[in-house]
């Protein structure tokens, strides 16, 4: 699904869809580089959940990260959990049950290639 961006006149410099996407990508990359261990833990958990249930959401991973490691949030690196080609978007969206997310829509992901992440020796599947 492609969402068209439209510029709001009179808001020069305040709204820019391409700049917004660029900043999002840069922020996720920086966050992932600064916290690779937690991100890899989250990816391993996402793979395990997807293998067990067939699909996975960020809420599923967040709950498991808290239960297993006491980690409440991955911050901006959470956006990188499903990046890298091992997961594909199913086309389904669900509402988050995490309180701070205010019922924001989450994508539902399907595992397509777990071997992309199995090269990490410190987090075996």
Image (cartoon, grey):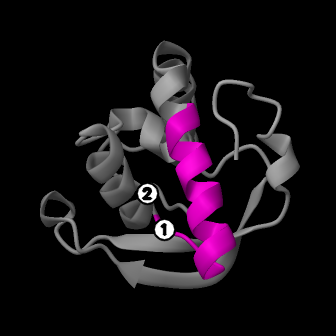
Q: Position of residue 22 (x, y in %)?
A: 57, 33
Residue at image point 54% right, 22% down: 36
Residue at image point 78% right, 54% down: 86
Which residue is the site of mark 1? 57
The local crowd at label 1, few if under 14, some if 14 to 19, many if 20 or more residues have their Cα within 10 Å, is: many
Q: Within the magenta stretch, is there residue 53?
A: yes
The local crowd at label 2, few if under 14, some if 14 to 19, many if 20 or more residues have their Cα within 10 Å, is: many
Q: Is residue 27 visible?
A: no
Q: Quadrant of residue 111?
A: bottom right
Q: Residue 78 versus residue 50: which sits nearer the camera?
A: 50
- Residue lying furthest top: 34
Q: Is residue 56 visible?
A: yes
Q: Position of residue 107 (x, y in %)?
A: 52, 71
Which residue is the site of mark 2? 61
- Residue lying furthest left: 99
Residue at image point 41% right, 82% down: 94
Circle 2/circle 1 CB separation < 8 Å: yes
Judged by its main secondary structure, the magenta piece is helix
Q: Is residue 32 above or below residue 86?
A: above
Q: Is residue 93 above or below residue 43?
A: below
Q: Look at the numbered disc 1 and give the secondary structure of its residue.
A: loop
- Res 47 label: none
> What's drawn in magenta, residue-wise?
40-57
Q: Position of residue 95 (x, y in %)?
A: 33, 80
Q: Is residue 80 left or right of residue 72?
A: right
Q: Is residue 10 above or below residue 57?
A: above
Distance CA(mark 2)–CA(mark 1): 7 Å
Q: Is residue 28 above or below residue 106?
A: above
Question: In front of the other: label 2 or label 1?
Answer: 2
Residue at image point 65% right, 24% down: 122
Q: Look at the numbered disc 2 and give the secondary structure of its residue.
A: helix
Q: Is residue 37 left or right of residue 123?
A: left
């Amino acid at each position: 699904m492609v969402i068209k961006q439209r510029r709001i006149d009179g808001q020069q410099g305040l709204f820019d869809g391409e700049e917004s996407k660029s900043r999002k990508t840069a922020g996720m990359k920086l966050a992932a580089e600064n916290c690779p261990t937690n991100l890899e833990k989250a990816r391993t958990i996402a793979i395990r959940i997807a293998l067990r249930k067939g699909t996975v959401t960020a809420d599923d991973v967040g709950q498991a990260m808290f239960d297993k490691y006491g980690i409440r949030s991955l911050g901006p690196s959470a956006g990188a959990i499903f990046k890298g080609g091992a997961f594909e978007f199913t086309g389904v969206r669900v509402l988050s049950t995490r309180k701070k997310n205010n019922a924001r829509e989450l994508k539902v992901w399907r595992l397509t290639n777990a071997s992309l992440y199995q090269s990490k020796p410190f987090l075996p599947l």
